[in-house]
Image (tube, rainbow, N blue to C red):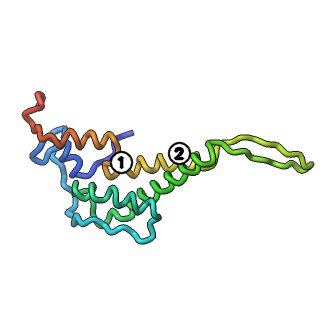
Amino acid sequence: MGRTAQPAALKLIGGRGNGRDSGGRVVNPGPAFRRIPPRPPTWLSREAAAEWRRVAPGLQRLDLLKEEDRAVLAAYCETWSQFVEATRTVTREGITTEVVTVSASGAETRRTVPHPAVTIARSAGRELRAFAAQFGLTPSSEQALARGADDGGEDDNPFA
């Protein structure tokens, strides 16, 4: 499986300078979107709105947000909200639950199964990682940003 494509701004931050990425290739700046941050939708849940307020300013400082990103950022924030709610449910109710089935003859059978919120949290976690990668919010993306922030330039690369 190939790497996830990164926005031009992220490639440049981790690049060599002069509009080149870390491999020395010229970075195509892409379409000239107006870099105006989107407004959060009014229908976001409370937790999702808090996540929007947490991540949007940082993404805007990196010039990664545009009005057209509203839907994806909203989906990321609502997925975060689902992850938080499912995790709280598991913490409160436990990782397993008991299921009682009654046969046609009236006999009860009890089984311990994973709590449904465990599956929801796991699924939301996978979706979160996918959304976060789109905005450079994963730990590996953070490391790439940190490497690009030192402004070492081409002179630090012995292979340049």
Q: Which mark is residue 133?
A: 1
Residue 118 is situated, as x and y percent measured from the top left of the image, at: 58, 46
Residue, x 45% and y 70% (percent of image)? 43
Residue at (22%, 61%) from the top-left corner? 31
From the image, state whether disc 2 or disc 1 is nearer to you: 2
Task: Tell me: residue 53, above or below residue 111.
Answer: below
Considering depth in this image, is 34 or 76 the residue closer to the camera? 76
SS state under label 1: helix
Q: Quadrant of the N terminus?
A: top left
Residue 20 is situated, as x and y percent measured from the top left of the image, at: 14, 44
Residue 57 image point, x, y percent: 27, 59
Disc 2 marks which residue? 122
In the rendered image, the residue lying farthest to the front is: 92
Q: Residues within 10 Å of mark 1 (few under 14, many from 20)?
A: some
Above or below for 96 versus 30:
above
Residue 70 percent location from the top left of the image: 35, 65
Left or right relative to 105: residue 116: left
Extreme-right residue of the structure? 105
Element under disc 2:
helix
Q: What residue sits 15% from the left and 40% below the top?
A: 150
- Considering every residue shown, the one lying at the far top of the view is 158
Q: Amino acid at mark 2?
A: Arg
Q: Residues within 10 Å of mark 2 (few under 14, many from 20)?
A: some
Picture residue at 79% right of the left edge, 42% below the top: 110
The answer to whether the residues at label 2 and label 1 have Cβ atoms under 8 Å apart is no
Q: How many marks?
A: 2
Q: Amino acid at mark 1?
A: Ala
Of label 2 and label 1, which has the lower sequence position? 2
